[in-house]
Image (spheres, grey):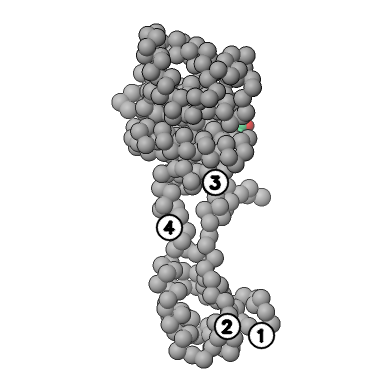
Amino acid sequence: MIEIKNLTKYYKDFCAVDNINLKVSKGEILGLLGPNGAGKTTTLRMLTGYFKPSAGSIKVDKFNLPENMIQIKSLIGYLPESAPLYHNMLVYDYLEYVAKIKGIGDREKRHDRFLKLSEICGLSSIMAKPISDLSKGLKQRVGIAHAMMTDPEILILDEPTSGLDPNQIAEIRDIIRTIGKEKTIVFSTHILSEAEATCDRIAIINKGRIVADDTTSNLKQSLEQDSIIKLSLQGASVEEAHTLLSNISSEIHIQHTEPSEKDMISFEIRGKNNKNIRSRIYLKIKETDWIICEFVKESQALEKVFQTLTKEVK
Ligand SMILES: Nc1ncnc2c1ncn2[C@@H]1O[C@H](COP(=O)(O)OP(=O)(O)O)[C@@H](O)[C@H]1O
Ligand SMILES: [Mg+2]
């Protein structure tokens, strides 16, 4: 549905987006995850045709930017970072205004569309309220309704939950998931749990580069496999335990660590296919008279990878 190739954007000499490649399939929810200043907004602005790339190509459906700008814009609904709403208008009047601008001239059609948007975005109780009276979360829902006015195939949201409280975040997530059942969605966020909870796929961007791009479950799974087992024993010497553990598999890496209590010995064990290894370790130790005091898997949260991939290189 979307194909971005070698996309690059310079602001004068500064490279904000550096040769990125991304594919988004129809019906997919892609999270563009990255810290502030990573290049998310710049990427989304190019994708929506608001910024001209310095290099690279963008294809949406069968259309190319910049030649088919009009067709592409009609396929995309876009909610920018700080949604520009007319604060002195009532929600209904605002949506009516947006609908007319977007060419929905027929009154009945507009009415049908408002009903649908009101249902998706939960607007029925606020239609008659001035936008200025709404909470940030409700304003954001009106912004999504705006972006979805012409029922576009693709919805692009730039940090849609930024600055919202946890309840409002949950509501926006629900709306994104509901819309995502029928549409293709790209949204940016600097919050990992956000991407993890909502997206089918996550592309991590840092300093203008894509540093990871996979399905959310694959990202999680690869971490799961690389996770660390912490083991503490009593009744064994470090050498004995090390030898026994080493004989379990040549593919694990065993490191003697500081125990949490004095009369124990502790190890950190790293390796692929962790689940299998855990049971083998357990069965081996069961054959001895050692006591297992600690046997835990330190699950490497996606958080950690995100931190590793995006940390400042000093
Ligand atoms: N109009 C601009 N002119 C110059 N530099 C910009 C401009 N917009 C963004 N930048 C810089 O480009 C980088 C990426 O910005 P942005 O795309 O807004 O990142 P994000 O949305 O991930 O926070 C940042 O270092 C930012 O300071
Ligand atoms: Mg931004």
Tell me the crowding category of disc 4: few under 14, some 14 to 19, or many 20 or more residues within 10 angstroms, Cα based.
few
Q: What percent of the width, then of the height, locates residue 263?
A: 66, 85
Residue 297 located left or right of residue 113? right
What's the CA distance linking mark 4 and mark 1? 35 Å
Q: Amino acid at mark 4?
A: Gln
Q: Residue at x 51, y 16 (%)?
A: 92
Q: Nearer the viewer, residue 213 or 96?
A: 96
Picture quadrant where residue 225 is located: bottom left
The disc at residue 263 is 1
- Vertical side of 76 occupied by 287: above or below: below
Q: Nearer the viewer, residue 187 or 23?
A: 187
What's the CA distance linking mark 4 and mark 3? 16 Å
- Vertical side of 25 occupied by 107: above or below: above
Residue highlighted by disc 3: 192
Q: Helix or strand or loop: what does disc 2 sit on?
A: strand
The disc at residue 101 is none
Q: Earlier in the sequence, mark 4 or mark 1?
A: 4
Residue 135 located left or right of residue 102? right
Asked whether the residues under the numbered discs 2 and 3 touch, taking CB atoms below 8 Å apart as contact, a structural biologist would say no
Q: What percent of the width, then of the height, locates residue 78?
A: 47, 25
What's the CA distance linking mark 4 and mark 2? 28 Å
Q: Helix or strand or loop: what does disc 4 sit on?
A: helix
Tell me the crowding category of disc 1: few under 14, some 14 to 19, or many 20 or more residues within 10 angstroms, Cα based.
few
Q: Nearer the viewer, residue 238 or 221?
A: 221
Residue 186 located left or right of residue 89? left
Residue highlighted by disc 2: 233
